[in-house]
Image (spheres, helix red, strand yellow):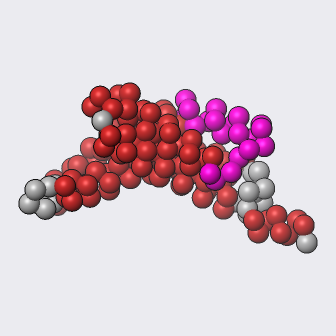
Amino acid sequence: MKSAAVIKAFLLAPIAAPFAFFVFFGASSWVFAEDWAWPWADLNDFVGAFLGIMMVGLPISYAVTAICGVPIFWALSRLNRLNGHLVLLSASTIGASLFALTWNRGEGYTILLGGVSGFAAGLAFWLLVRQAPNSSLNPDAQKRRAG
């Protein structure tokens, strides 16, 4: 596996978590509102909410990636168990656990929101790592080596 692809994935994938939080939170606020009112009254509210969520969420996402994601990636790599299922499961579990422990006493919606955010970061990470041309995780590269 190319280390440049892994570093790129660790730098870009955490952006997906606060972005997914923003999309999921906005959509669910709209769906569960009594009058189906959009949660942001105008474009300024929308942009302000997006920037606020990104400003708070990005540092948290990068910290969680460094504290939890890197060691899990390293352990899965060392055990030869690195695959998409475990990456997505790990990222979702980390996100759900973080939200359950820190935000709003761990209610069901909060845990779901954390799981979706973690899943988005894990999916972005997996797609970036797997996309590397010479990656051992890329099925096309495996076929070229075998054939």
The residues colored magenta run: 66-85
Image-based side of 75 in relation to 113, left or right? right
Does residue 57 appear in this view?
Answer: no
Query: Residue 77 in the image: x percent, y percent?
Result: 74, 41
How would you classify the magenta stretch by its main secondary structure? helix
Residue 138 is drawn in which quadrant?
bottom right
Query: Residue 128 in the image: x percent, y percent?
Result: 61, 57
Which one is in front, 61 or 31? 31
Q: What residue lies at 85% left-to-right and 69% top-to-bottom?
A: 144
Residue reaching furthest to the front:
108
Q: Is residue 67 magenta?
A: yes
Image-based side of 25 in relation to 8, left or right? left
Q: What residue lies at 56% left-to-right and 32% top-to-bottom?
A: 68
Residue 61 is drawn in which quadrant?
top left
Residue 81 is drawn in which quadrant?
top right
Image-based side of 19 in relation to 144, left or right? left
Which one is in front, 54 or 85? 85
- From what the image shows, is residue 116 above or below residue 62? below
Which one is in front, 44 or 87? 87
Q: Is residue 106 magenta?
A: no
Does residue 65 appear in this view?
Answer: yes
Query: Residue 136 in the image: x percent, y percent?
Result: 78, 56
Residue reaching furthest to the left:
35
Q: What residue lies at 47% left-to-right and 52% top-to-bottom?
A: 120
Image-based side of 62 in relation to 138, left or right? left
Q: Quadrant of the C terminus?
A: bottom right
Residue reaching furthest to the right:
147
Q: What residue lies at 82% left-to-right and 64% top-to-bottom?
A: 142
Say how many tags the image has: 0
